[in-house]
Image (cartoon, grey):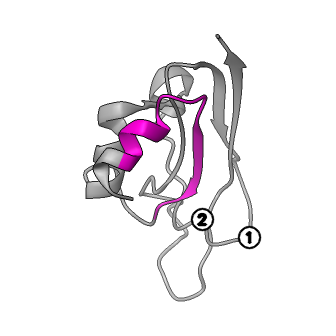
Amino acid sequence: VPYTTFRSLAELPTLIVGDFNSPGWGSLPRLFQGELQDAFDQCGNGFGYTFPAYDPYLPTWLGPWLRIDYAFCNKSWRPLSCTVETNRESQHRAVSATFELTR
């Protein structure tokens, strides 16, 4: 998304959630963190690691060690809660977030 388009989008009540396949220091999450709130950073507990949750080809017995799944919102929303599921035989652990519309 071109930066100018992204800034215009952020003026509307906006939620952007999903698998970004990029850790927090990656370019896309950093772009969003500059304009939007990260729900897990605002009201989550722990590290919020979501990947790899389970993969027969990776050493997953230690549990996830990256956070690459996010829930972002703009100033029109207030994050109320954000959690990462605790156990699942899937490549990613799901992120669940609750938001309140503020305007």
SS at mark 1 in the image = loop
Q: Nearer the viewer, residue 60 or 101?
A: 101
Q: Name the side, left or right, on which 35 lies relative to 40.
A: left
**Residue 61 percent location from the top left of the image:** 55, 68
**Residue 66 percent location from the top left of the image:** 42, 57
Q: Within 10 Å of the Cα at label 2, are there few (<14), some (14-19), or many (20+) other Cα atoms?
A: many
Q: Nearer the viewer, residue 10 or 101?
A: 10
Q: Amino acid at mark 2?
A: Ala
Give the magenta part as a residue range: 5-20
Q: Amino acid at mark 1?
A: Glu
Q: Residue at x 70, y 47 (%)?
A: 85
Query: Which residue is denoted by mark 1 in the rendering?
Result: 89
Of the numbered discs 2 and 1, the one sitting upstream in the chain is 2
Q: Residue at x 48, y 28 (%)?
A: 11
Q: Name the side, left or right, on which 35 lies relative to 98.
A: left
Q: Residue at x 25, y 51 (%)?
A: 25
Query: Which residue is denoted by mark 2 in the rendering?
Result: 53
